[in-house]
Amino acid sequence: MLYKYIIITLILSAIILGCAQRNPVESAKHLKSGIELQNNGKLDDAMSEYNMAIELDNKNPTAWFQRGVLYFSKNNTEKGIEDLTEAIDISPDSARFYDARGYIYINLKDYSKAMDDYEKAVSKAPDNAIYVNRRGYVYALLKDYVTAVKDYNKAIELNPKYEDAYSNRGFSYLSLKKYENVVNDFTKAIELNPNRAVYYNTRGYAYSNMKRLFEALPDYDKAIQLDSNLADAYVNRGYIYLNSDQFKFALMDFDKAITLGAVNSANYNARGFAFANLRQYTEAINDYTKAIELDPNLTDAYVNRGFSYYNSLEKENALKDWQTAVTQKPELDSSLKNYMDKAGRKQ
């Protein structure tokens, strides 16, 4: 009987101890305080409140959720995932918990795990346009643009004024080269939010691919007006100027793009082409050389530098560049042959 009494006593003690450890009412108070502090930017104080909320009730899923989101905002993704996983374990039917963890996985570029979470989020809340849109975004990151479009369609059906769904669908259509659809979606996105430079830039790019340059140009102008640091808009507008023989304007745009950090072989090659057409051959040669340094397989840069060398009467260098170009792309032999013959003749 003594052993039974001891066992019963121990069980009762454990139950009493467990009850003492859980205090849902006080936990909720600290949780509320933490949310208020976090909203006011007092993140360290908020963290302390969430810690206390969890200490008082470790089965409070919202406390784990809030702390997990806060950890993520402080760039501690590992802790963020741990806390959100704990929240999901306690409350596996909460779609927003999967959404939050899925978002972290997106940032970690772990798209497979992100997809798993968004599948769960959508299954728990199929009428939530945000979760459907974000699942579509993960499909797009996995380069399954067709399925992504289906999710964006559904999100727009659920919320016809969902700006992000239109822009996301527009980007997927861009990857599918359905430029008319791109124009339609970004026109709608602009209607919903006329102050985002990237919308005008992307619609302009679609117009450019449809050869509707006179519609593209005002879009690039507007994008630059809204965001004077949007390098892509300068690049895109620069190509319109190149194609319409407005080489001074093209030069200024590629100058600006490169200054803003759009440092790549294509942009140096394009600026070099503008310099060359302005008969500034030394500057053109410098840009083509930079383009080749960045991408030794950029055949166009060898061809273009060859012409600048030729026009600078450096025919030996011109011949070397054209020979390299033909080695890389033998089909160029016929179009370059006459020039190579001239460059190879002794004076």
Image: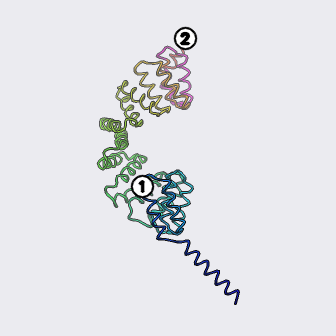
**Residue found farthest to the top:** 347
Is residue 36 on the magenta stretch? no
| Frontmost residue, 118 versus 346 | 118
Residue under circle 2?
346
Dot 2 crowding, Cα within 10 Å, few <14, some 14–19, many 20+:
few
The image shows residue 156 at horizontal and vertical percentages of 34, 57
Identify the amino acid type marked 1.
Asn
Q: Earlier in the sequence, mark 2 or mark 1?
A: 1
Colour setting: rainbow
Secondary structure, mark 2, is loop
Q: Which residues are magenta?
A: 310-338
Q: Is residue 67 above or below residue 333?
A: below
Tell me how far mark 2 sits from mark 1, CA to CA: 78 Å
Q: Quadrant of the N terminus?
A: bottom right
Q: Is residue 326 magenta?
A: yes
Amino acid beneath label 2: Lys
The residue that appears at 48% across and 51% down in the rendered structure is 141
* Up-down relation of residue 333 to residue 194 (above or below): above
Viewer-proximal residue, 309 or 12? Answer: 12
Label of residue 39 in the image: 1
Determine the residue positioned at 34% across, 61% down: 158
Give above or below for 115 relative to 7: above
Q: Could you classify mark 1 by the number of other residues whose Cα lies within 10 Å: few (under 14), some (14-19), or many (20 or more)?
A: few
